[in-house]
């Protein structure tokens, strides 16, 4: 019983201390204007010269704030340049090849009504019109979530660039 009373008293003391008056963060304004700052002294702002251990100068004519940045060190002769991010292809294709996309199906429709049931059906359909299939994969894309929108799963096929018009006639889109 004594333990519970002791714990209750300690919690009450902590609660009273936590809910007590707060100390103001800023000193009150001096309405008298007599120069009395209430015992507070202004702090001088350190300068870069003072921070570097040099004596402070009295505002030389050629100083500027902030001080100028040092010039960068040039790369040595023959150092390779960094590649531009806009020229890096995350899916490099073979020279003269393009990637084409076709959704697996349409949302809210029966999967048996899809144009292509398997990757082999895709290869057979493209080969039938004279398109050489170099690679085929399935990929997930962001699409709308409503009926009559394409499914997020798409067939992704790499074909020769010369065959792109034939693929577009079969409702494929270039990536």
Image (cartoon, rainbow, N blue to C red):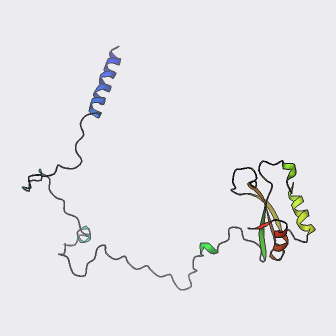
- Which image quadrant is residue 17 in? top left
Residue at 27%, 29% in the rendered image: 16
Residue 29 coordinates in the image, percent (x, y): 16, 51
Residue 103's place in the image compared with 81, above or below, is above
The residue that appears at 14% across and 56% down in the rendered structure is 41
**Image quarter (top left, top right, bottom left or bottom right) of the N terminus:** top left
* Extreme residue in the bottom direction: 77
Q: Residue furthest front?
A: 148
Q: Nearer the viewer, residue 156 or 60?
A: 156
The vertical placement of 58 against 148, above or below, is below
> Seen in the image, is 23 located left or right of residue 106?
left
Q: Is residue 46 left or right of residue 133?
A: left
* Horizontal relation, residue 165 to residue 36: left or right: right
User: Farthest residue toward the left?
Assistant: 34
Q: Residue at x 69, y 54 (%)?
A: 144
Quarter of the figure with the C terminus: bottom right
Q: Position of residue 156 (x, y in %)?
A: 78, 63
Residue 3 at x, y = what percent? 34, 18
Compared to residue 62, the image places residue 7 above or below, namely above
In front: 88, or 22? 22
The x, y position of residue 111, in whole percent, is 84, 49
Q: Is residue 89 left or right of residue 14?
A: right
Number of callouts in the render?
0
Residue 79 lies in quadrant: bottom right
- Displayed quadrant of residue 7: top left
């Amino acid at each position: 019983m004594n333990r519970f009373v002791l714990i209750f008293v300690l919690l009450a003391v902590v609660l009273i201390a936590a809910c007590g008056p707060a100390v103001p963060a800023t000193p009150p304004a001096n309405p008298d204007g007599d120069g009395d700052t209430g015992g507070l002294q202004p702090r001088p702002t350190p300068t870069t010269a003072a921070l570097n251990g040099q004596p402070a100068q009295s505002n030389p004519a050629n100083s500027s704030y902030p001080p100028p940045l040092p010039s960068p060190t040039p790369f040595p002769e023959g150092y390779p340049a960094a590649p531009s991010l806009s020229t890096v292809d995350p899916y490099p294709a073979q020279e003269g090849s393009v990637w084409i996309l076709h959704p697996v199906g349409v949302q809210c429709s029966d999967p048996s009504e899809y144009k292509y049931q398997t990757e082999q059906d895709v290869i057979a359909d493209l080969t039938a019109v004279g398109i050489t299939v170099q690679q085929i994969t399935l990929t997930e894309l962001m699409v709308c979530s409503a009926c009559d929108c394409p499914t997020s799963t798409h067939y992704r096929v790499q074909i020769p660039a010369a065959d792109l018009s034939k693929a577009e006639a079969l409702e494929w889109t270039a990536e």
